[in-house]
Image (cartoon, rainbow, N blue to C red):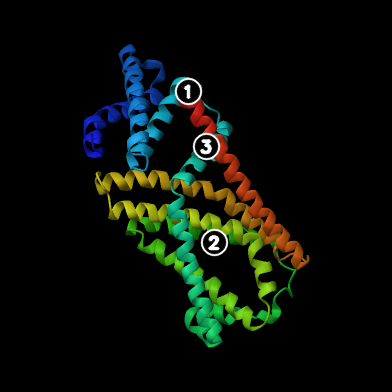
Amino acid sequence: MNIKQFVKQHREEWKQLEQLITSLHKNRRHLKEADIDNFHRYYQKAAQHLSYSQTYYPNDDVTSYLNGLVSKSHNLLYKDQMSSLKQIRHFFSTTFIRLFLEQWKFILVAMLLFAIGGIGSFIAVKADPLHLYSILPSNIAQGVDPEQLGSSDGAVNSPLMSASIMTNNIQVAILAFAGGVTFGLLTVYILIYNGIIIGALAALFWHYGKTYEFWAYIVPHGMIELTAIFIAGGAGLLMGYKLFVPGLYSRGYQLKYQAKRSVQLLLGTIPLFIIAGVIEGFITPAAISLEAKYIIALLTVIGLILYIMIGKLVFMRKTIIYHGS
């Protein structure tokens, strides 16, 4: 059976299960016995379809869809309603990690687009520093003075700066995500443009012999901040790709389904932006050594890697337990 036949044959059963899940959530106390019996029957069928889909169509959207549908059914059937704290913990330990692992290719593409913009502008400004004024907005190009780097350490309004930075970065992430509805074109522009800014500034500080100092002020918050932007950008790229190549589904369905997944990825980046904003507002401008700033950057990278690795292990463990139940 090809995937088109598989979806066509079972789509109505999945729709029925979705409707029953909604009914169970909203009218738990007034359900008919027949509804509960139907829920059990459709849930078991969906679990079988998921197993089949994982075997024959492991990389298709239908497998991700069934995985989410069966997971919701499983939680509804075997678990008490989770508290808000438990829901948050479940989201960051399971849901966000699952989406991250499923969409890592688009996150990687987002990183590559940023790198293309950065490398291109670095080469241009390195060849001729005057290119900086044609590449960057005038307020950025005229406001940068490499000779003043570090001169205001310890003399900034850290809380105000941190809040401003967090707001700006979250806005960039939202734009990168929302750009998916333009078939990903706006997302591509935002990623390349932000790479251009960093690359051009890096080349300017290179001309002044301050590359080491420049990156010491970028990487402590930048590793987390850029990871979050790449995740949001990857979500936007995925949405755009599915709108451009909808496959077996309508563009309306893809927009609804991928937007829901992408919003969850975007929500998962908020703690990363908060951490990056705190570092950029309080630690980056602090009067500490450059070496200490690099150490903080290293710790953030280690923290990110550990979070993803531990999250992946937790997700795999829950998947094994679920399939064994």
Residue annotated with mark 2: 168
Q: Which residue is at 30% across, 30% downward?
A: 14
Q: Position of residue 166 (x, y in %)?
A: 58, 57
Within the image, what quadrant is residue 291 found in? Answer: bottom right
Within the image, what quadrant is residue 199 found in? Answer: bottom right
The 10 Å Cα crowd at callout 2, few under 14, some 14 to 19, many 20 or more, is some
Q: Where is residue 280 in the image (x, y as percent from the top left)?
A: 65, 61
Give the number of the mark in front: 2 or 3.
3
> Label 1 to label 2, Cα distance in Å?
45 Å
Whichever of labels 1 and 2 marks the residue nearer the N terminus, that label is 2
- CB contact under 8 Å: marks 2 and 3: no
Q: Is mark 3 on a helix, strand or loop?
A: helix
> Label 1 to label 3, Cα distance in Å?
18 Å
Whichever of labels 2 and 3 marks the residue nearer the N terminus, that label is 3
Is residue 288 or residue 296 the one in the foreground?
A: 296
* 293 in relation to 212, above or below: above
Q: What element carries label 1?
A: helix
